[in-house]
Image (cartoon, grey):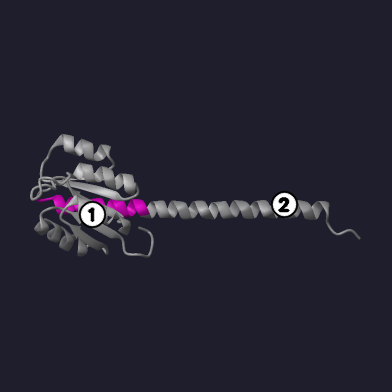
Amino acid sequence: MASNATPTVFLVDDEPIQNEMLKDYLAERFNYTFNLYDNGEEALNNMRLNPEIVILDYHLNAHNTAAKNGVQILREIKERNPKTQVIMVSGQDKIQVAVDSMKYGAYDYIVKGETAFARMENTLKRINEFEESKFAYESSRKSIRFLIIAMICIIILSVLLLTNGPRL
């Protein structure tokens, strides 16, 4: 997320009102491009858009009983794009769903409720901080690599000048 492009976030919930409320809440706080999906399969079909974050509901088959659940979608997202951060959301406070979510690569598991949006905001801030620190780390590694190469070149040139220096 350290790039200049606006990060893309997928919101995946089979309840359109929930998706819209979350989008409105987050849009006031973050500069993201939001794509809303009412099923996981549609989100998977659009993974070519390379979302940085996917906020994924666990129970995605309320309207379509044949739809995959959130953990199944999570697994496919992580197979296709392991760098995408996935936040699993559920109306059920089930330990097994939380464990499975984390086991298959979810960044966080949030139970829907009165504090869910605030918790989501905090989770997104942590993701942003993590991505910024990764960018800073990579930048410093490149700088150190450049400095080491420059020092080696200076040493080699110094040795060459001392051994093959100008002779009068």
Q: Which residue is mark 1?
A: 43
Predominant SS of the magenta segment: helix
Between 167 and 20, the one lying in front of the other is 20
> Is residue 8 highlighted in magenta?
no
The amino acid on which the numbered mark 1 sits, given as a three-letter code, is Ala
Q: Which residue is mark 2?
A: 156
Is the residue marked by circle 2 packed among few (<14), some (14-19), or many (20+) residues within 10 Å?
few
Between 110 and 106, the one lying in front of the other is 106
Pinpoint residue 151: horizontal percent, then vertical percent.
Answer: 65, 53
In this view, the mark in front (1 or 2): 1
Pinpoint residue 126: horizontal percent, then vertical percent.
Answer: 29, 51
**Left or right of residue 52, residue 35 in this image:** left
Pinpoint residue 10: horizontal percent, then vertical percent.
Answer: 23, 56
Is the residue marked by circle 1 packed among few (<14), some (14-19), or many (20+) residues within 10 Å?
many
How far apart are labels 1 and 2 at the CA level?
55 Å
Pinpoint residue 80: horizontal percent, then vertical percent.
Answer: 33, 48
Residue occupying the point 27% across, 39% down: 104
The amino acid on which the numbered mark 2 sits, given as a three-letter code, is Ile
Residue 106, visible in the rendered structure: no
Residue 9, visible in the rendered structure: yes
Identity of the residue furthest to the front in this view: 66
Which residue range is magenta in the image? Answer: 114-131
**Left or right of residue 15, residue 122 in this image:** right
The local secondary structure at tag 1 comes to helix
Q: Earlier in the sequence, mark 1 or mark 2?
A: 1
**Label pair 1/2, CB-CB below 8 angstroms:** no
